Every structure is written in structure tokens, then in C-alpha cells.
Image (cartoon, helix red, strand yellow):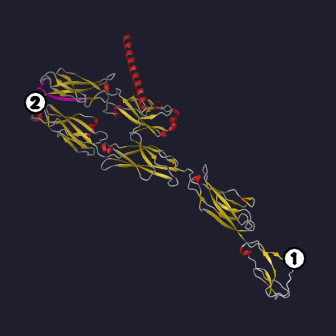
Amino acid sequence: SAGGAAAEMCAAGRRWGRRQRALLWAVLLAAWEAAWGQLRYSVPEELPKGSFVGDVAKDLGLQLPALSDRGVRITERGGTQYFSLHGKTGHLVTAERIDREQLCESLQQCVLRCELIVEGQMQVYGVQVEITDINDNAPGFREAEKELRMSETTAPGSRFPLAEAHDPDSGRNSLQSYELSGDEHFSLAVQAGPGGDQRPELVLAKALDREEAAFHELVLRASDGGDPARTGTARIRVTVLDANDNAPVFSQAEYTVRVPEDVPVGSVLVTVTATDADEGPNGEVKYFLKKITEKSSQTFQLDSDTGLITLLQSLDFEESNSYVLELHAQDGGGLFDKTKVVITVTDVNDNVPEISVRSALSEISEDAPSGTVVALLHVKDRDSGANGEVRCSLDAGVPFRLEKSFDDYYRVVTARELDREQVSEYNVTVRAADGGRPSLSSSSVLALRVLDVNDNAPVFAEERYSARLAENNAAGALVLRVRATDADWGQNARVRYRLSEGRVRGAPLSSYVSVQAETGALYALRSFDYEQVRELELWVRAEDGGAPALSSNVSVRLLIADENDNAPQVLYPPAAAAAGSGGAWSGVELAPRWSEAGALVAKVVAVDADAGQNAWLSYELAKATEPGLFRVGLHSGEVRTA
């Protein structure tokens, strides 16, 4: 008892050492591959959901607090999400229980691939996870009971193929050996197939005697190499018949057929033929499928009487492009021949390219530099060859271009600087077309809004403004409106107006006029007197709401229009000082008695402070003691003898 416990402890120590060495090698390999944008891990199948796979954050050198800020996520190419990223620890964990046999039915190495996308860096890393096998399946026979019919004249040493057991596990956990028990007349031989598989055969070790024993009961046991090993059994009943000395013979040792994947269900793919030289029941041939996977049995049907192989369900090149069937032709006496049918499926262009937007911006500043990444796309086509070669393109005339990123990933980047004032929104259509004939294509639309930058100064509607204002105006009178527009948007396009500093007759300009900041309306703050101020030259500034603000100036000329608000003023003769003169002017002039007609007697000089017609003066003789002796010039004011 003590010796057995010690041996068990030694064995456990050896297993622990192997696991540690394998773990160290996996860590070193993951660190080397992470430096090249690839991560590789290995986990056994059937782990519970949430089991640890690998420390992605450590292997990629990402800080834990930055994981959520950078938008790190896992995407997988299939429809099922097998892994997820733990946001707090940076660990890659299983998202569900993984069955290796379900995912990789016939593959020696089962590798799941996914991508880790760091959105903040627009970076993508490939992740490969190898699913290792555990011994969770026992070998099994398709038929738990089998009846063989043998002639009593069968020579010792004759061989009869037995049904092979199937174990979906791999490596040492798969099928390893067979053993036969039950009767001394038979022994077991195991042959190695072309692919290394074991094919059990029943060997007649001792001549049969139907009169001695008409039936023989045998048990065939299949074992795998697991620890502990799993087994499966099939019962074999041998019925001894009378002599049958001719076995069926197939017309071909191997049948090969190529069919397109879109061949209709129910089509006859190939007909196998075998003949038997015997007569009666010993010459009647029946056809059987012997070595066939479960998937093949659901896809093809063999007519046991005619040898016709027909299609039961649609083929899909992308799921499986080749099938191998092993057929037996057996006569009524139990003799048989075997052949192989190889069905090759050719690809048809039946899958459109798929465009997946893995990361994208919804808005971009108009001053973003050329080469700014706006979207990360993944493009794939499940077809093969030319049918699966995808060409991606963008519509012409847009300021964007496509760049190949990693594997089947593309980046949409800006090809030049944007101008929101010309185009404020883009619907960028990405098109993917395969190389098939006819070509299949798909498209995806990226909606992108261009954000405004304050790159446009306000522009006045006119190069310069002018207005006329009659003097004696009311204070607060509207003079004119200036208007400026800004091609930017929002706060950057909000225009406000103000006067540039200046002085008029020693007083600030702002005491004469003002401009309304929002509307650009220019108002007179006082009543103007033409005789004091005849015109104003001023500048109005329009400034937008950007930071920093942009501005422009415009010249405004204000002309004061004269009104007849001043009476003429007589300069000569001077005003009379005598009382009762009534504000009139008077003067004494001497004229000789012998003055001829037209002689200048006196000249009245007067001025008017107004301008234009308002300052044009005319003279007339208002009163005279001798009206007929003198006359006055209408415009000159000269008094002459008549």
C-alpha cells in the first residue's frame, strides 16, 4: 500500500513537471508572437465559461486603466463568440464551453482565430487559440450488432472486414486498439489504412462446420489511449452458410467524380457496379456504405440494389470540398469486394463579399490632416480562388482613400484636407467586388459629419457704404444698415458689429453715431448741423464668435444734407442802431445830381450760411421814396440809377 502511494506521487510529479515546462514554453512563444502583432495560446477543451486563456494586456504591453479608455474589444470571424476580454484584468477568457470535436471534426490541430481591436489606436492584433483534446469521448460503433454470413467451405485464413469504431478525440485519446473475444474459430487482424487508421478484420482461424455449429457469437472491443482508457463494443453474430466460391468484383478500384457545389438535390452523382459469377442468391449483389462519416451519411444516399449514389442535401464548398466513401459489394453468400468513391466539390461564386465596420468615426474636424483614419473595415469572401479574391474601392470624387491594414482589414483615411463650407457631410460608400464571373459585390455606407473650424472671416455685402442724412435730424435716427456674413457654422458664424475708434471736431466718434452689435444698424446719436459737420468718415468692424475671433472692416461715408435753416445776413451796409429800425439795415450814400443812368450808387453785400440753392441770394427793391429813380441788381445787390 505504501509502495503504491509512492509510485502514484512520482507519476503525479512527472505530470506536473511536464505541464510547467509546457506552460513556460507557451508564455515565451506568446511573448515572441505579441511583438509581431500575433498572440497564440493553448487551452484544453470543455473548460467552463470564464476560464483563463491568456494575459492579453501583459503580452501586448497595455496598461489596465487604459483598456476601457482605448476601447479594446475582441471580434471573431464566425457567428459564435468563443472568447471575451475581461476589462478589469486584461485576461482573455472563454465565453462559453468549447467542444473540440464539434469545431474540428477531422483536424489534427484545432485553432480558433480572433482579432483584438484597440479602437483608440486604430490597431488590430491577431489572436490564435489552440484547443487541445481531452479524453471525453469513448470509441463507438455505428452498429452495436453485426451479422456475418460465411460459407462452411471458407478457407482458414480468410479475412472479413469489420465495422470500424469512431472516436472523435485526437492523438492518444483517439482510437488505439481492437480486441476480439468469444470463439476459437476466429481471430482478429488489424490493418493500417492509407491515412494511418486501423481497420479491423475478422480472420477465420479454424475451418467451419455448419453441422457442428451454425452460429458463432463474438464481441469486438475498441479502446482509446486515454488515462483511464475508454472502450466501446460491438456484438458479431456469424452465420455459417453453404458454399459460395465467387466474390463480387467492382468495375473500378476507385471511382472519382467532380461536381459543382450548386448541383441540385436529388441528382445522381455516380453509379458503382459490381458483378458476381455465382448464380442464385450467391450471385445477387447488394451495395453498402462501410466507412463513412456522419456528415457524409446525411449528404449522400446509396441505393443498395442499383449502386446509384444520389445527393440528399445541398453541397457547400466552403464547408467541405471533398468526400471519400468506402463501398462494399456483397453477395448472398457473404463474399464481398470493396471500392473507394472520391467526390470532389468545385467552387461556385455563390457568396457575396462581406464588409464589417469594426471601428468608425461619426464626425471629423475640417482641419484634420491628410491621412487621418476615419474607419477600420474587415472584408471577406467565403468563396475560394478568383471567386474569393476581393477588390475594394470608394466612389470617385470623395476626399478619402483605402489603405490595406492587416490581413483582410482596410482603413479609410482622408486623402486631403476637408472644407466644411463646401461639403458639411459625407456618405462614403465602400464597395467590395469578388473576381468571379459574373462578379458579386456588396457595399457599406459610412456617414461622416465635418465639424467646423473658424477659418473664414466675416465678409461685408458691399465693399463700402455711404448714406445721406438731412441736418436737424432727430437723435436716434436710423442712418443705414451694414451686413456681413460668415461662411462658418454655429458660434464661428455669429457676427457682431462695432465702430472703430475715431474723433470728430475733438469729440469721440461714438458720441455722434453708434452701431447695433447684432443687426449692424447705424444710428445718429445727435442732431447734425450741416454748417458744422458736413460729412463723417468712419469704419465698422464685423467680428465672428470663434476663438480666436476673425474680423473684417468696411468704410462708411455719411453725408449731411443741407436744409434752408439760415436767413441771409447783410454784411454791408451794417445794421442800423437807431431805435425802431426793426432789424433792418440802413446806410447813407451820396450820388451827384449829374449822375447818368446806370451809375453805381451803392452795393449791398449779404451771405447765407446754408449751401447750394439755399445759399443762392436775390435782391429786390422793397421800398423807395422815389421808386423810379433807382434799381437794384437781382443777383449782384448793386444799386444803380435808373
Residue visible at 32% across and 49% down? 439
Q: Residues within 10 Å of mark 1 (few under 14, many from 20)?
A: some
Q: Does the magenta stretch include residue 150?
A: yes
Q: What residue type is labelled 2?
A: Asp
Image coordinates for residue 254, horizontal then vertical, percent: 18, 36
Of the 4 image quadrants, the one containing the C terminus is bottom right
Q: Nearer the viewer, residue 164 or 23?
A: 23
Which residue ends up furthest to the front in the rendered image?
594
Q: Is mark 1 on a helix, strand or loop?
A: loop
Q: Is residue 205 left or right of residue 433?
A: left
The answer to which quarter of the image holds residue 235 is top left
Image coordinates for residue 276, horizontal then vertical, percent: 11, 35
Instruction: From the image, tell me which residue sits under label 1.
Output: 576
Mark closer to the chain start, 1 or 2: 2
Total label count? Answer: 2
Q: Which of 479 and 338 is in front in this view?
A: 479
Q: Is residue 28 above or below residue 280?
A: above
Q: What element carries label 2?
A: loop
The answer to which quarter of the image holds residue 507 is bottom right
Residue 15 visible, this orientation: yes
Q: Is residue 209 left or right of residue 386?
A: left
Residue 49 visible, this orientation: no
Magenta stretch?
A: 144-155
Q: How crowded is mark 2: few (under 14 residues within 10 Å), some or many (20 or more)?
A: some
Q: Is residue 313 magenta?
A: no
Of the 4 image quadrants, the one containing the N terminus is top left
Mark seen at residue 245 = 2
Choose mark 1 or mark 2, whichever is in front.
1
Q: In this view, does 622 lie to the left or right of 198?
A: right
Q: What residue type is labelled 1?
A: Ala
Mark seen at residue 393 = none
